[in-house]
Amino acid sequence: MADRDLDLIQGTLNVLILKTLSWGPMNGYAIAQWVGQTTDGDIAIEEGALYPALHRMEHRGWVEAEWGLSENNRRAKYYRLTPLGRRMLRDRTESWERLVAAVGKVLQAPSRTQTA
Amino acid sequence: MSPRAWHEPPGEPTWRRYLRFVRPDPAADLDDELHDHIESTVEALVARGLTPEAARAEALRRFGDLDHVRREVRHMDQQHHRRLTRAAALDAFAHDVRYALRVLRRSPGFTLVAALSIALGVAANAAVFSVVNALLLRPIPGTTAPRLVRVYVNHHSPFDWRDLDWFRSRARSFEAIVGERTAAMVMQVDGGATERVRVGFVTSGFFDALGTRMTLGHRLGAGTGDDRDAPPAVVLSHRLWERRFGADPAIVGRTIRLAGHPVTVVGVAGPYFTSSVVGWIPDLWAPVGLTPLLGDAALEDVNSLYTTARLRPGVTRDAAEAELRVLTARLAQTDTARYARFGVRLDHVRGVNAELRAPVAAAAGFLMVLVALVLLIACANVANLLLGRAAARRTEIGVRLAIGAGRWRLVRQLLTESLVLAVVGGALGFAGSLLVTRLLAAAVPAEAQLEASFFAPDGRVLLFTGALTLATALLFGLVPALRASSPRLAPLLRRDVPSGGRQRSRLVAAQAALCVVLLAVASLFVRSLASVRGLDPGFRADGVIDVPVDASLAGVDDAAQRQLFTQLVERAAALPGVRSATLAAIVPLSGSNMETRVLPEGMTVASRFDAPRTYFNVVGPGYFETLALPLRAGRGFLATDGPDAPRVAVVSETAARRWWPGERAVGKRFRWGGVDGAEVTVVGVARDANHKMPGEDPLPFVYLPHAQEFRGEMVLQLRAASPPPALRDAIWATLRELVPTLPPPPVRAMREDMAITQLPVRLGAELAGAFGLVALLLAAVGIYGVTAYSVERRTREIGIRSALGATRQRVVRMVVMESLRTVLGGAAAGLVLALAAGLLLSRVLYGVQPFDPVVLAGVPVVIAAAAVLASLVPARRAAAVDPVTAIRTE
């Protein structure tokens, strides 16, 4: 069961990153910032999970990276979606929404004592 | 630093670009990426008013375990990179193979000649290695037990049963110690005709110790582990089961008769198991405990048990041998006379028994060298063809180099072509070797009873052939590949660049040299075979007819069998055309030998192992007259040397000289069979004769009268004026009158029986001859290729010569002489090698000098003739060139 939870969390992280990158190329820091600001700080992506996820998606060909210079002249690695990544984002979004709807139905079902 | 630009040519798989991405320095890239993250956090915090130091500390705290993240991502990247590299290599290889197949299909003539050259070389090597494997490397076929060792007494001698029993009950280093000996016996099934079978007598637990695979039933049980209470049970060989019982699945539980006694079949051994000793092929196995019942020896007197043992797990051979030494010392105290100088040795169980290993290894080594030469010639041939092709493909390769293909890339491509060629040739060659080993097994005389599967390849042969094929590809492919891709030549896309001509000539010269060696060795063997046939063996074999007669199959007792033999000899001698008749246990030079120890009168020995050994034969009256083997002193055997008369013997001149130097041998006595044997008196001395091998050094030899050393299985030998077929019916009729139930035996010339001892020389001659011819053929193809190429290259020059008035004849002579010069240069070098080979072989060759003038003169002539023939075709083509077109073509 623990593994399934992990899968769910990782899948969620992946879809968050993909969605973030659909706005344009970003480095890891910007991705974390963007997610944090969009959710008003409700979701804070941990760096310990972010970078493995980014590299894994890069290996799978969902995102590709390009080196550039940051405003302060540092080497920075900018990730952007590949066509495959875009498709993955669509798929994952749909299944995420289905999951949320399903979980919602379960949680909002009337309790047993009430139906009796 | 600027962003890296990446431009990819179209058609490259997308993932390839990631290779470049990862390749430069993934570790540094990752550090930069994480550094950027930390610094971005610091900047944000500073903007919110923290001091830089506090901001950095906070950024690091927020990031968490930086080292851990770095290690994890690094590991992921590395694994990914490795996967990509592997896939890329595989992809490139598959691409190269496809390309190679395309290229090879485009020139079928080249591909065919090259693949066949390799196939010939590989076939010869795989076949000879199959033989080496069967005779020297393979553990006992058809068994599964690990940690088997052979146990010998002193140097390669088998055990007596009581010694084996003594060690087996005491030695702790072994899980089992078992022995096997063979003896001929009479078998009868369902009251039908009797027949002779070879029985392997085995000690208890024999099959379990070896882990023999069984086709049916179970192994002879170990029972109490005591040979004395062995059940009357037998295990059939797979062969006998198929041949005699039609592979009857219900055979287990049936009763057959062995030497008249009922025994029950309890199982059938697997098809590959023949014996614990390579070369033995028993028809069935019985417990050694049945010897007293079936034979005439008490168990305590059983000897000649070839002994195999299984080490306990974790016990080394040295440790086991050390234990055996300690035990031997204890054993020696029980009987100091018997066990003086008694030692026990362990040896591995691969291939033939240790006493045969040296000669077999020498013969095998010789054959391996011969076939290695054939393979080298084949490789030279293919290299030659490849060099020629490289010249032809210069434009293609030049263009590829010019548009930026790396040299390594090209070498890899060309080597892949060689590899594909080698694999095709190697597969063909392996198939060919199966055929060759079948022919070889068939060439061995039927008496050896070799299974067709004896030389069948196993994993070891496959591995050898595979490795050989790879080595071959490198051997013939590397130099041409390096040469063809040489950047020095690449820019020169012009057509008239000289390329590889000299190397190709050198290769042809080398081929000629190797070819001379092979042909010279083959000729030496052929001449040796001729002189072996002309050797005087000491007796006259021409006009002697052999008829093997097995009186023990008649189902009567010894006295009746003696009577039968006496009558048979009398009647056979009276047949028309027969001058004399006699009996012999073995035919000299037929491959069978009997050996024992004797103690001559007047000689003292320190132990029973020091008593001299001698070969012997058991013969009837009239033997020396029938074989025309002259007696130097005394007399031959008479009818009066009967079973109850004093024991007598005839010895050879060498025996007489060695045992009683300077004395008269007639009248001397010796003990027969060893220090405690019966006393026998010498009544005659016979001329030395060849018994084991033609042309051997004279051996001590003893003849015993059949009446005093009875055997049921003898050979009737007749000196006759008529050939065997003319006498056959008369002999069969005589036999039928005497014993109606006896199956008619073969009637054949003694020369036929003697053929087997000429086998090593004959096989040597045939194999070396065949390899020599193959070599000659390969060399001729090489010469043809080089000449044709050089003629083509010089079309213009030849055209000019013709235009200047050279006749066609002169052009032909010029071309032929050129290739002849190359070949003769190589042949001269080959002759030197051939001389060395001849010296090495001088011990095997009879009556031939390694410096045989006929061979030394003849072989270069043959090579030269082949060179002339092979270059004649291209030479004539050159001469036919029209000068005008020739000059215009360039």
Image (cartoon, grey):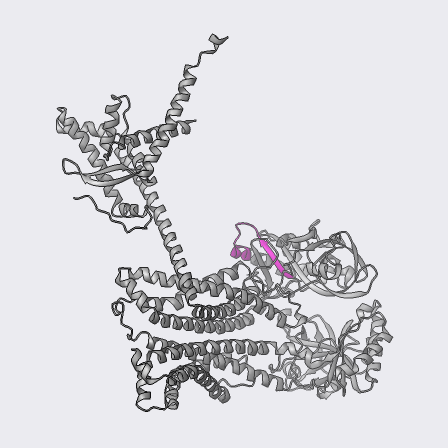
Q: Residue at x 38, y 85 (%)?
A: B879
Q: Is residue B537 visible?
A: yes
Is residue B389 rendered to the left or right of residue B229? Answer: left
Q: What x and y, as percent, mark residue A82?
A: 30, 38
Q: Is residue B116 left or right of residue B696?
A: left
In the image, B460 versus B582, the foreground residue is: B460
Q: Residue at x 35, y 84 (%)?
A: B882
At 36% from the left and 76% from the top, the residue drawn is B504
Q: Position of residue B2 (x, y in %)?
A: 17, 44
Whether B112 is drawn above or below B37: the answer is below
Asked if the stretch drawn in magenta spans residue B309, the answer is yes
Q: Is residue B887 left or right of residue B263?
A: left
Residue A100 against residue B674 in the figure, above or below? above
Q: Quadrant of residue B764?
A: bottom right
> Is B644 located above or below residue A107 in the figure?
below
Q: Quadrant of the N terminus of chain B?
A: top left
What is the magenta range? B306-322
Please name whichever residue, B774 or B353, is drawn nearer the observer in this view of the structure.
B774
